[in-house]
Image (cartoon, rainbow, N blue to C red):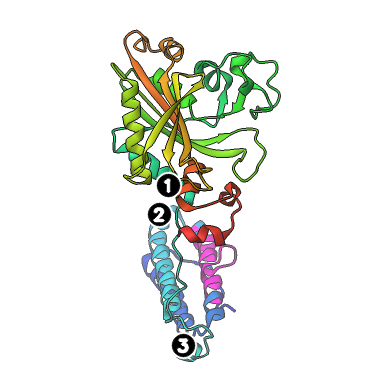
Amino acid sequence: MRNEAIPNLTAFDEAALDEAFAALERQAREAAAALGGEADREAFRLEWLGRKQGRLNEVSGRWLKAAPAEAKKALGVRFNALKAVVEGLLDAALGAGPSDAALQTEAIDITLPGTRRLLGAEHPITRTMNEIVAVFAALGYSVGVGPEVETDYYNFESMNFPPGHPARDTQDTLVIAAQERKPLRDRLLLRTHTSPVQMRTMEQQPPPVRIVIPGKVHRNDAADATHSPIFHQVEGLCVDTNVTFSDLKGTLDHAMKALFGPAVKTRFFPSFFPFTEPSADVQISCIFCGGKGCRKCKDSGWIELLGCGMVDPAVFAFAAQKQPAYDPRKISGFAFGMGVERIAMMKYGISEIGSFYAGDMRFLGQFA
């Protein structure tokens, strides 16, 4: 409840203003001195600083608006000073905090240490992908990125996939709905490999190029122990003058030793990929039995791990449409690609690819 009503001012000279504001300040100090708990402090705030019925709001309405023009400045200065005093009194009351008796009845001991926040850890897929990228970064490769929703042109056509190639079929590729009216090269799909980033990079910069491309890819595969419709790849591209297949073999042999240990051996077998010619599959000596033969390598002593090859001149021809420097008569290059999940399963002894995506903290906690 208010101490006194705000009277109307009848005089606006300096002496009258000093007396009126001094009386209000005296009332505010007396009210602040009598404050007790939180409820009293809130009542004081509303009484003096409330927007609709606060005493200072009433002073502004009654005195400032009624003052003659020549007195408004002097009255405004005193009003601001009074408001500062009231706010200071309220701050001092709030800073006083609870009494000793209130602290003694407090149910929570605020001197105890807080709850410890546990630090997170990299997901095994992320960790493995970073390890692979680090190996090639040490060889001078930069990291390339690109969209997961791609056009048919970048995902297939520029990578030398012919129009009737089985990979373009909806049984193998996840396509975006309602694309039938668009030209084939403009239709959208979820990228099936990170190879489109190779073309996008070559279109943006002339050779030499050395990039490694980690990322998520999508294929219309049924989930089982070793397959998932969503998985991750790391691809690489090296383009320069006089790049040979021997450079490719040396690069991948070094990478496999860096990932699996210096005792690992590599061997290459002829293969086929639309975007490389010649192409090869790469096998490494079994890391579980040391090449002697076991159940994991089907008693062969070798495990197939990735694909690679020399960049097909037809791919360079697509890049040359925007970057003439990619003339297959003057430059050459190699490309490779590997599945991150497969490498992670080998490194950490994981038998089910679905374990990576189940979100089971008991599984993921092993990698913390």
**Residue 177 visible in the displayed image:** yes
- Most common secondary structure along the magenta stretch: helix
Q: Amino acid at mark 1?
A: Ile
Q: Quadrant of residue 2?
A: bottom right
Counting residues from the N terminus, which is met first, the one under dot 1 or under dot 3? 3
Rendered image: mark on residue 287: 1
Crowdedness near tag 2: few (<14), some (14–19) or many (≥20) residues, C-alpha within 10 Å: few
Q: Which residue is mark 2?
A: 70
**Marks 1 and 3, Cα distance to the nearest angstrom?**
69 Å
What residue range appears in magenta?
43-64
**Marks 2 and 1, Cα distance to the nearest angstrom?**
94 Å
Give the camera-side residue of 358 and 106.
358
Could you tell me which secondary element the residue under label 3 belongs to? loop
Q: Amino acid at mark 2?
A: Glu
Counting residues from the N terminus, which is met first, the one under dot 2 or under dot 1? 2
Quarter of the figure that contains the N terminus? bottom right
Crowdedness near tag 1: few (<14), some (14–19) or many (≥20) residues, C-alpha within 10 Å: many
Could you tell me which secondary element the residue under label 2 belongs to? helix
Q: Which residue is mark 3?
A: 99
Could you tell me which secondary element the residue under label 1 belongs to? loop
Q: Quadrant of residue 316?
A: top left
Q: Are marks 1 and 3 in contact (CB under 8 Å)?
A: no
Depth-wise, is mark 2 or mark 1 nearer the camera?
1
Rendered image: mark on residue 326: none
Quarter of the figure that contains the C terminus? bottom left
Vertical relation: 184 (above or below) 137: above
